[in-house]
Amino acid sequence: MFLAGKRALVTGSTSGIGLAIARALAAEGAKVVLNGFGDEAEIAKLCEELGATHSGADLTDVAQIEEMMAGTGGVDILVNNAGMQHVSPVEDFPVDKWDKIIALNLTAAFHTTRLAVPGMKEKGWGRIINTASAHSKVASPFKSAYNSAKHGLDGFTKTIALELAADGITANCISPGYVWTPLVENQIPDTMKARGMTRDEVINDVLLVKQATKKFVQPEEIGALAVFLCRDEAQNVNGANWSVDGGWTAE
Ligand code: NAD
């Protein structure tokens, strides 16, 4: 329980990877603030299970981010994890989807960070963990907004890692390959359309083709790495972009 007494905000934690990170941090004693959308009763159950509170802030809206951050009363661990995907050829890419993906996957992390940093600096301790993606290092076609946002998140993380290092604050990216979550499942129909493939072809010939282990990453593996990054032993892990992608980006 080495995180007892620490407060952690995990954005996009009502589902998938964020929920696994929230569970892992709570298991080490952190007081967790969940964020994200979903069924109210299920979210209430999660809060009870984790001893957590919940903010339903829409992170594409700056005013809602500011309200959420003020409501947390300061966080020691900030996990910028909320994200969305859209798959489409660039010439057909809906403009509103581009704007939303950049807002949620990149700009929201800037806002939460700028609002969390003064409190971390005061305490002389902080951990900022950004869920990037293999797509922060390499691209795949038809994901122009997502690839741009995730490459940007990597650059943002390196920048703040340098700015905040002397204040006892580290900032790192975790970059998963394909993790079986609703975000991945929901992109299968559009990928089938964009590439003229069947569902099985999308899974085997697109999603897992570069993941050398031929296995989807489990959300719990990301949770375990997030916990490690919070340890004192990780105090010199700063500005890194950790791949958890079965070897995809080693090629
Ligand atoms: P998910 O769809 O299971 O979860 C997304 C979470 O974000 C949910 O809690 C949802 O309610 C929340 N959310 C969505 N829009 C929001 C908004 N406007 N404001 C606040 N919260 C919002 O997705 P996931 O697969 O767990 O993805 C989590 C992160 O991991 C994302 O940043 C994603 O890009 C990244 N990632 C996922 C994979 C993968 O294979 N699943 C791979 C690499 C990176």
Image (cartoon, rainbow, N blue to C red):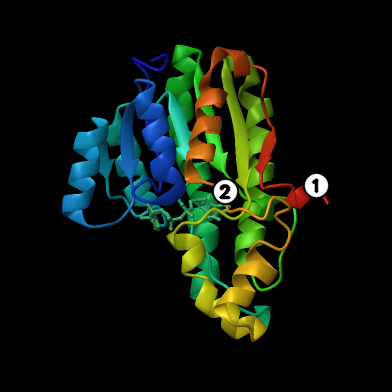
Mark 2 lies on residue:
217
160 to 29, vertically: above or below: below
Point out the image quarter for the N terminus: top left
Nearer the camera: disc 1 or disc 2: 2
Q: Amino acid at mark 2?
A: Val
User: Does residue 93 appear in this view?
Assistant: no
Q: Nearer the viewer, residue 159 or 2?
A: 2
Mark 1 lies on residue:
250
- The numbered dot on residue 74 is none
The residue depicted at 23 percent of the width and 35 percent of the height is: 49
Dividing the picture into quarters, in which one does residue 89 lie? bottom right
Ligand 1 is within 8 Å of the C-beta of the residue at disc 2? yes
Q: CA distance from mark 1 to mark 2?
A: 16 Å
Q: Nearer the viewer, residue 138 or 98?
A: 138
* Residue 188 image offset from top left, x and y in percent: 53, 73
* Residue 23 image offset from top left, x and y in percent: 37, 35
The residue depicted at 42 percent of the width and 23 percent of the height is: 76
Image label count = 2
Q: Residues within 10 Å of mark 1 (few under 14, many from 20)?
A: few
